[in-house]
Amino acid sequence: MTSESTSANKFANTSALENISSAAAKKAEGLDENVQNLRNRQNKFAENLHGDDVSKTGIRALFSKNKEAQKAAVSKYLKHWDGLTDKEAEEKRLADYNESTHSYYNVVTDFYEYGWGTSFHFSRYYPGENFQQATARHEHYLAHQAGIENGDLVLDVGCGVGGPAREIARFTNCNIIGLNNNDYQIKKANHYAAKFGLDAQMRFVKGDFMNMDFEDNTFDKVYAIEATCHAPELKGVYSEIFRVLKPNGVFAVYEWVMTDKYDENNEAHRKIAYDIEVGDGIPKMFSREVAAKALIDSGFEILKEEDLAKADDPIPWYYPLTGDWKYMQSISDIGTFFRTSFVGRFITTNFLRVLEKVGVAPPGSVDVANSLESAAVGLVAGGKEGLFTPMMLYVCRKPAN
Ligand SMILES: CC(C)=CCC[C@@H](C)[C@H]1CC[C@H]2C3=C(CC[C@]12C)[C@@]1(C)CC[C@H](O)C[C@@H]1CC3
Ligand SMILES: C[S@@+](CC[C@H](N)C(=O)[O-])C[C@H]1O[C@@H](n2cnc3c(N)ncnc32)[C@H](O)[C@@H]1O
């Protein structure tokens, strides 16, 4: 492709992206008053908590939070997590999914960037490949499975701070709308897109994936990476994806599910699922069977269903959280591996404990670090025992009629 055709293409893309995001904003204006109030409140809260400057990342960003707002965000998130797994406790968490997830990402985003980077997902790891290469390859693989091509209009459901969107846009030259419920992450994603010169190819917008603001039949392809597990009900989010996808369009997802080995009535199994829920901001972990049924009930034809964690890879997907140095593939991964390992996490938590005491780190930082510790413990246990996978790949088509 010539540079002229690239820039002409980019011009056309920008206007398509502009049209869709402004149509979505218009639709949002007509939303139920309660939903509008919730959105305004969340936006104001995020601005107050994080301030205007989203260029700082990681621990440095953590130190510039509004302390009162941070305290409120942590308690908003933790209020439903009391160790209970009975029906009533679960119902409360499911009903509050929107606020609860918003609060979760308000308090963990800086930790994620500090420990993991800007792509918030696990990957398969191959011998000789470093962490960033593995992350990018895992994203390319999904784009390939979805059949994303040059010029396609693509929706990224639950886009985080846009790490995968930037990689997939570079890889395929497609145009992406990233949908996200968290205002801080949306600002960051738009900031990074501009910083890396990709803003003509992508827009990140506010919305709830259970009730999207896009018109029917808008997107050529849709993908979701480790995001739809935050839904209170999978059929709700899949049906919305089905609605906004063009007929014959493809949806590809890396879903978080409990595997067929998981027994909800086994206390040890339920403890692992609970650790994953509390530490990862998930109201309820669903099983593989529930996910597949929800896709079919939403109208999709499943083209491919594969648990990539079952591929018998020599390096397990959860290795960065284990502290098992033998799996590290490159010297360039030392920093990341140390921060994600048990020892690195222990040091981070205790460093924050001191800084929180002397008023440098915002209140609640240690509670957040402890929650993330539960996540790490639950994820590794779930992975080792084969009870959980973060990479259940589904490739689905919306039938032509
Ligand atoms: C929540 C969902 C659906 C997906 C996120 C997957 C992963 C990117 C995160 C799951 C647990 C997270 C932890 C960290 C980074 C991001 C995760 C791996 C830390 C390593 C960040 C730095 C902290 O000090 C420790 C965290 C442990 C858990
Ligand atoms: C683990 S992160 C994954 C982000 C991104 N896919 C990536 O791989 O970097 C999950 C994302 O889903 C978003 N999310 C959770 N619930 C949502 C909802 N109801 N509507 C829209 N986005 C949501 C979160 O804000 C977060 O950005």
Image (cartoon, rainbow, N blue to C red):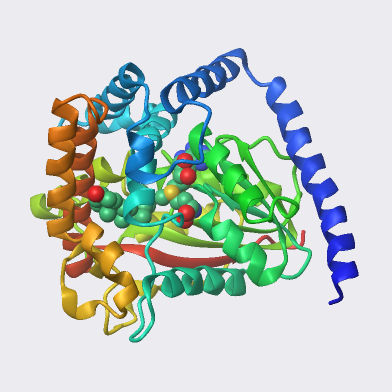
Drawn side of residue 261 relative to residue 390, left or right: left
**Residue pictured at 37% horizontal, 63% vertical:** 122
**Do we see residue 209 in this rendering?**
no
Quick one: 199 or 82, which is closer to the camera?
Answer: 199
Where residue 55 sits: x, y (%)?
A: 51, 41
Where residue 109 sits: x, y (%)?
A: 39, 42
Q: Quadrant of residue 70?
A: top left
Quick one: 298 or 1, which is closer to the camera?
Answer: 1
Drawn side of residue 226 relative to residue 26, left or right: left
Quick one: 213 or 44, which is closer to the camera?
Answer: 44
**Do we see residue 181 in this rendering?**
yes
**Residue pictured at 16% horizontal, 67% vertical:** 323
**Residue pictured at 50% horizontal, 46% vertical:** 235
Where residue 277 sits: x, y (%)?
A: 27, 44
In the rendered image, the vertical position of residue 97 relative to residue 18, given as above or below: above
**Residue pictured at 44% horizontal, 28% vertical:** 50
Quarter of the rendering occupied by the C terminus:
bottom right
Drawn side of residue 63 relative to residue 166, left or right: left
